[in-house]
Each structure stands twice: as structure tokens, then as C-alpha cells.
Image (cartoon, grey):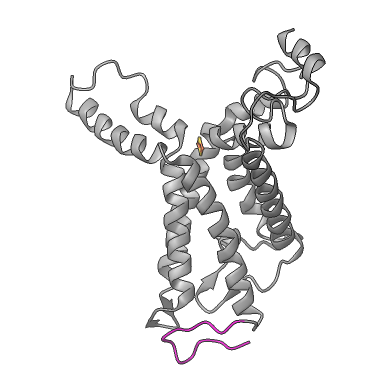
Amino acid sequence: MEQNIAVGKQGWLGTARRDTWWVEPLLILVGLSAFGIYSTYSAVFWDYHFEIGPYLSPFYEPLLVFDWWPFSPAILILWIPLGFRTTCYYYRGAYWRSFFANPPACAVTGWEGKNYAGEAKFPIFVLNFHRYFMYAALLLNVMLWVGAVRSYWWQGELGIGLGSIILTINAFLLMMYSLGCHSLRHLVGGKLDCFSCSSCARTRKRIWDYITRWNEHHKFWAWVSLIWVAFTDFYVRMVSSGVFNDPNTWSNFPRP
Ligand code: FES
């Protein structure tokens, strides 16, 4: 009711704030839209030039190729990071403000939102599955590390290339994003009334302390890992299609 009165008085986006409150939701809107368009195009419609030599785009890791699957192999993987990010506690607030403007920022009038029923009804109810996406995402993190390590090995020869470094940074950033997850923090330290009552509790407390530290910067890891994973995919594609030459130590590295 109060919100409706505010809308009537001030109109949409009405506020007494004098700061540039609109910059952050606008940047989020542009950033997430750009990533959504690029990743959809890359994974769904550009299903070639995604690997070269020991490098495989992270959108395709692990590479699952089946005769019965007529679409891009990336689709078999991408539902995991997509579900993980869409249900992430940080991203929920971010896209709720930027895309639905309900409200767009603190003390700024948004849409009336008469039908909002919390997370009790479909489709917002789906956000409760975050923990399950997290299990799958942690597994995917392991696969990304496998891909990063594999990128130092080509045709029986240990080496290093710019792509190896980019893939390694990508695995690290996505790991930091996943390890700062609120659900993981709760999984490790939740339902624990006494931190010092047993050796198991003390170990959990120690891990919980680490996750808490990473969790404090969850927003940072969320954005840096998002930008870097798109950049990594782009880099592999550019090398694979012959636009860039990857500087590396292998004499037999394929040249498209
Ligand atoms: S809360 Fe962001 S990944 Fe779990």
C-alpha cells in the first residue's frame, strides 16, 4: 500500500535522492544483456571454432559429443552456470533492480509489483534451487581446472601459451566466484551451534572463515569471472579461426 502511495505521489523512478543512483543498475543492465547476447550467440549458433590445439572454450568444457544430440554441445553444459548465476543471491538483487526496476534502487520508486509473492510461487520459486545448481557448478569448476591443466600439454609435449594462461585465470576466477557462494557458506557453517565443541566443528569453522572472506567480495568475483569467461571463449575462437596467433612454446601448434 505504501509503495502504491509513493508511486502516485512521485511517479515511476521518483526519488528525493540527488546522487547518481541510476549508474549501477544501468551498468548491470548493459553488462548482463551484453553477456547474455554474446554467450547465447557463441554457444548456440557459433558451434564451431571453439577449440584449437590444447585449448577448449570454457563454454564447452567438458566436451560432450553424442550422435543423438543434434545441437551445440555447449547447451549440454551451459544450463549449469546459467542456473547457478541466475539463482545467485547477488545476481538476483542485481537483475531484479536493473531489469524489473522493482525498485531500481533504495528510496527510488519502481513498479507497483502487486503480484509479488516472495519466493513461494512459480517462477520465483525456482530461485530456491540455487544449492543444487551449486553442487553441479562445483563439479564444473573441477572440469575447468582439468581443461586449464590440459592446456599446458600438446601432442605429448609440455609447454605454455597465452591461451594456457588465459584458461588458468578463467578457472581460478570461476573457482573464487563459486567458493564465495552464500549457499556453500551455509552448507559448511550452517546448523552449527558451537564452533569449538569438536574437531569436526573447528574444521568447519576454519573453512567457513575462508568462505566468509571470499563471500565478502562475491560481487567482485561475480563480475570479473563473468567478463573473463566471455573473453576466454572469444580468445579461443579468435585463435581457432586464425584471427589471432597464440604465442606459445609448441613448434607443432596448429595454424588455421
Ligand atoms: S550466492 Fe552467488 S553463487 Fe551462490
- Which picture quadrant has residue 217? top left
Foreground of the two, 64 or 215: 215
* Residue 242 percent across, percent down from the top left: 64, 84
Q: Residue at x 66, y 53 (%)?
A: 35
Residue 212, above or below 124: below
Q: Residue at x 74, y 32 (%)?
A: 100
* Residue 114 visible to the viewer: no
Q: Residue furthest bottom?
A: 251
- The quadrant of the rendering that contains the C terminus is bottom right
* Residue 223 percent across, percent down from the top left: 54, 49
Foreground of the two, 110 or 195: 110
Q: From the viewer's perspective, is 212 left or right of 234?
A: left
* Residue 178 percent across, percent down from the top left: 46, 44
* Residue 134 visible to the viewer: yes
Q: Residue at x 67, y 32 (%)?
A: 97
Q: From the viewer's perspective, is 110 left or right of 208?
A: right
Q: Residue at x 51, y 53 (%)?
A: 225
Residue 45, above or below 201: below
Look at the image and give the residue range highlighted in magenta: 244-256
* Residue 174 percent across, percent down from the top left: 47, 52
Instruction: Say whether residue 247 is magenta.
Output: yes
